[in-house]
Image (cartoon, rainbow, N blue to C red):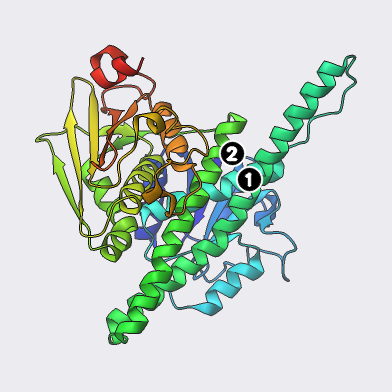
Amino acid sequence: MSILIVDQNLKELYKLKTELESAGYDDVVAAESVGNALAYYGVDCLGKVPASVELILMDFATPDAQESGFRTGTRASASTGNTVMLGLVDQNNPAMIKRAAVAGAMDVICRPVHKAELLMRFRSALALKAERDAVPPAEGTFATDSDENALDSAQGVSHTTKVLSLASHELKTPLANISGFVDLILLDWERHGAPSEKQQKQMEAVQRNGFRMDALVNDIMAMANIESGTLEISPTDLDLAEELDHVLGYVQGQLNEKRMTLDLIFAEDLSPVHADELRLSQIMVNLLGNACKYSPPDTSITVEVSATDRFAQIDLTDHGYGISAKDQVNLFCQFHRVNNPSAQSVSGTGLGLFVTKQLVEAHGGQIWVKSEEGEGSTFSLTLPLSKLAASQSLPVEQFPELAAAA
């Protein structure tokens, strides 16, 4: 798979290239202009680039972005041929966004570009492309009723998974646009004067619920990949302190809403973990989001990070409603909701912990919980340190909680 970046800003161009390569995208082609890109591939239109080019990130401030690179007129589909295109645009520039839409961009990314957002948009676009490019399985003749029933069942699961995946990807674009415009409004208020207290609270509520919707869509997408056996991770060496600081931005609104505090405690000289950056963020957003939702106001959450021989261990402790021993048995199962009167009033799908467990185990880690009703909960998980391959994990007997459960 190859990715093409066209950006006239050389500093930004090579920053984007470096960030994508560090995330595991090996073949990234960087060009200052559409003309240079066309010359590199030996074609006269970006719609004719080789099939190996799966995604184009196009800077629509580049003078020849539309004139030299695309055919005139609005495109019927959101891609250039079989290649997905994302637009790179300036904030507060509707004309540039319109230009990207006319050229056939599936989505836009506003400057300044944040690495987490860049990778999220790339993976969403590539996953949607994979769904659209998927060839339906050939029909065949089956000799027995049991075979036909098995086929119907498999097709039913496949259809459900595809619907979930497509619906999730289609939700991603409007969600990204909503979040983007909220960010622009808040930034404008910072620069040109504060709004009224009522306006500020209303906009923060929109932003907070946008984050919640994004987390739900991420869980649905992950579940679809898990069900279809296509869940992929791209682990790199990550600084946990830095990553958790980024995650805090997603849950800060929930913490503020309930006047809760969050304490982060890190062991000294902690080695980087070997994990997928976006999946790690999804894991922690799920766990921290649950701790916020299932805790009363004016309480605290503590996240403590320590290290064993080969693994980092994250312990997240809240002072919430707690979980009964009976509920803990099925806690990480799909669609399970805790049977607790205090928790029943909290909205949820029962997907978050199921997805979280699958993501942790995909990294070669483990996750478990210690809790009592009315006494709060501690969720613990392990992730391999950077010197390990992501598939390796410690034997279960080295963790007393897991050994007892086994």
Q: Is residue 204 at all visible to an observer of this figure? A: yes
Kind of residue at badge 2: Ala
| Quadrant housing residue 373 | top left
Q: Position of residue 247 (x, y in %)?
A: 31, 51
The residue shown at (62%, 56%) is 170
Contact? badges 1 and 2 (CB < 8 Å): yes
- For image coordinates 39% across by 21% down, the residue present is 391
Question: Residue drawn 59% across and 68% down?
Answer: 100
Residue 309 placement, left or right of 250: left
- Residue 162 placed where, x, y %? 68, 41
Say whether residue 238 is left or right of residue 1. left
- Name the residue beneath numbered marker 2: 224
Kind of residue indicated by mark 1: Leu
Q: Position of residue 336 (x, y in %)?
A: 49, 38
Tell me which corner region of the image, top left, top right, bottom left or bottom right, holds residue 194. bottom left
Against 197, is 390 above or below?
above
**Relative vertical location of residue 82 with respect to residue 403 in this rendering, above or below:** below
Rounded to the nearest angstrom, the CA distance separating label 1 from label 2 is: 6 Å
Q: Is residue 253 above or below residue 327?
A: below
Front residue of this view, candidates 346 and 162? 346
- For mark 1, what is the residue? 164
Badge 2 density bin: few <14, some 14–19, many ≥20, Cα 10 Å: many
Visible residue check, residue 31: no
> Mark 1: which secondary structure?
helix
Q: Quadrant of the C terminus?
A: top left
- Counting from the top left corner in percent of width and height, residue 253 is at 31, 63
